[in-house]
């Protein structure tokens, strides 16, 4: 697809994406620079002093990992929620393919009957009624 045939919406979508993504990237970098201190995340609710399972990592890394996990969970929930629509679309695609095959079959049959009967293309004779006497 060359540049002339590309839809105008594609360029607008790229501009809007740049307007949104560039400031988000700047904010993310600023957040990472401002929050470099390490934090300890404990996975042991019973021993707060000496947890059995804990991770120490920079705060910005923790926030970014949690954002990524949130996006993955949200995407999975959306994908599962739209399963009914995907199933319906697949069923309708199969039905459309079947109907197109049936239509092609009828067109081939109609084409063959027109070729086999050349007189069918001519209009029928006109009936003439006699006037009453």
Image (cartoon, rainbow, N blue to C red):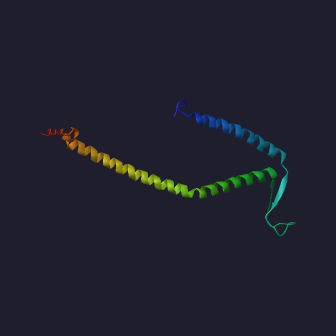
Q: Residue furthest right?
A: 49
Q: Quadrant of residue 85?
A: bottom right
Residue occupying image coordinates x 82% and y 44%: 33
Q: Is residue 1 above or below residue 37?
A: above
Residue occupying image coordinates x 83% and y 66%: 51
Q: Residue furthest left?
A: 133
Q: Is residue 107 left or right of residue 31?
A: left
Q: Quadrant of residue 130?
A: top left
Residue occupying image coordinates x 77% and y 52%: 63
Residue occupying image coordinates x 60% and y 55%: 79
Decide which of 130, 117 is in the foreground and name it.
Answer: 130
Q: Is residue 75 above or below residue 51?
A: above
Q: Is residue 39 left or right of residue 121?
A: right
Q: Is residue 29 left or right of residue 129?
A: right
Residue 91 spot, x, y in % from top left: 47, 56
Decide which of 76, 42 is in the foreground and name it.
Answer: 76
The number of numbered discs placed on residues in the rendered structure image is: 0
Q: Residue furthest top?
A: 4
Decide which of 124, 93 is in the foreground and name it.
Answer: 124
Q: Residue furthest bottom?
A: 46
Q: Is residue 95 left or right of residue 124?
A: right
Residue 133 spot, x, y in % from top left: 12, 39
Residue 35 spot, x, y in % from top left: 83, 48
Residue 53 spot, x, y in % from top left: 79, 65
Q: Is residue 96 above or below residue 23?
A: below
């Amino acid at each position: 697809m060359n540049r002339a045939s590309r839809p105008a919406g594609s360029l607008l979508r790229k501009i809007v994406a740049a307007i949104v993504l560039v400031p988000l990237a700047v904010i993310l970098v600023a957040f990472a620079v401002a929050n470099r201190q390490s934090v300890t995340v404990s996975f042991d609710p019973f021993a707060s002093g000496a947890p059995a399972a804990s991770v120490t990592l920079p705060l910005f890394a923790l926030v970014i990992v949690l954002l990524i996990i949130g996006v993955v969970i949200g995407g999975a929930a959306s994908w599962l929620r739209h399963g009914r629509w995907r199933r319906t679309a697949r069923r309708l695609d199969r039905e459309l393919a079947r109907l197109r095959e049936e239509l092609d079959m009828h067109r081939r049959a109609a084409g063959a009957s027109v070729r086999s009967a050349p007189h069918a293309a001519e209009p029928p004779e006109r009936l003439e009624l006699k006037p009453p006497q």
